[in-house]
Image (cartoon, grey):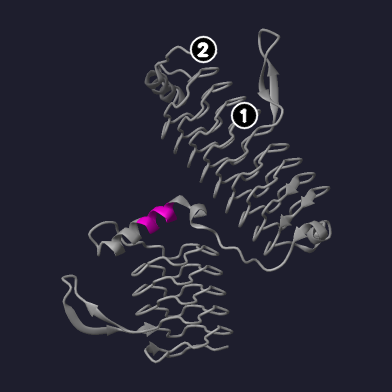
Amino acid sequence: MPTWNVNIPEILDSHKLWLVNSDGGRQADLSRRELMEEDFSRKSLDRANFVGAILKNASFVQASLVEADMFGVNLLNADLRNANFTKAILKGAMLRGANLENANLNAADLRGGIILEADGASTLGRDRTDISDCFMNYATMRRTRMSGVDLRGSRLVGASLEGAFLFGADLSGTNLTNADLRGADLSEARLAGTSLERADLRGVQLRNAIFDATDMRGARMDTALEMVIDLNRCTIGESVTAISFGDFPAQFRAALHQHESWVKSGGATGRPAVLSGMNLENFDLSGRNLSGIKLRGARLRGANLTGCILMLSDLNGADLRNTNLEAANLTGVSLTEANLSGARMQRVVLGAIPLRAKDGNATGRIQRVSLKNAILADTDLAGVDFSECNMDGVKWE
């Protein structure tokens, strides 16, 4: 394995010219190089040659690697967030512990693969691509070839695996909560301790799949699928587990950190979060101070907002079906046309609040809770005081 230094900037500049068929351009060839901890973030590396390269702890954040040849590459603990690996070759690669959050692996080839080196004695690659213990939340892997791969212990919360090929893959201990697996092939896959909670499994192939303490609560399944599942080895029923903060999409985590800083500092630091229209279904936001947050039209179905402070927040038109709002502080909140069907609202605070100007002086105005045209069908309202609320047009059925 060559260990001498290479002029990375020069190679990348020449590769850019090669990609546009310009004079002086040359395809980037970093095959079999030792480039541990190298930073390729935001670089254009489409169709680059990384065959057999050692890239442990390297960074490819937001890099473009469309159709790159990365056969047998070692990306142990690499940072691959938001990288684009569309149609890339990653056969026989080592990706254990890598961060692939929001990465695009559509139509990539991650099957196992071994080739004989020129010396006739050594080999490159591995018979099972190692993607174990990876953080792959919200990654996109539509039609990705992953037959026989090792995905043990990886987190793929909210990942898109529509039409993916996972024949014979080991998914033991893998977290696929809220994942989209429509039309995927998981035949003969190992699903021991796998979480498929709230996953979309319509059209999934599960012939001879091995079930053992598999969590399928709240999963969407069609009738044909239900007939091949070993129900004695699965947990089936209503989903109760919320998505923890560490599994939120990165942009949501950053927005909430900024918002909480803004609230705590009284506007001196951070900035208010605007998550209107966003999908926050089943998220655990319990106990957080999100006063003044913008969640107009947001999807919060099944979310945990227990003890959450949402004073003066905008939740107009939000989907709060089956949301847990116990002991939440909704003082001055606007819930006009929100859907609260089946929500739990015991001990919720629905008071009014005096409004102040930016300089802190009183304006003489009061912000009351607005439930105008909201839906409160089958909502648990034990002990709730609506005296300070606008209840015009509330729908109870």
In-front residue for pair 92/42: 92
Q: Residues within 10 Å of mark 2 (few under 14, many from 20)?
A: few
Task: Relative to 157, say whether 299 is above or below.
Answer: below
What's drawn in magenta, residue-wise? 251-257
The residue lying at 68 percent from left, 54 percent from top is 182
- Residue identifier under label 1: 93
Looking at the image, tell me whether mark 1 or mark 2 is earlier in sequence order: 2
Q: Quadrant of the N terminus?
A: top right
x and y, in percent, of residue 104 in the image: 54, 42
Q: Secondary structure at mark 2?
A: loop
Spatial separation of the CA atoms under disc 1 and disc 2: 19 Å
Task: Relative to 16, say whether 162 is above or below.
Answer: below
x and y, in percent, of residue 81 in the image: 48, 41
Q: Quadrant of the C terminus?
A: bottom right
> What is the quadrant of residue 390 in the picture?
bottom left
- Residue identifier under label 2: 2
- Say which amino acid is labelled 2: Pro
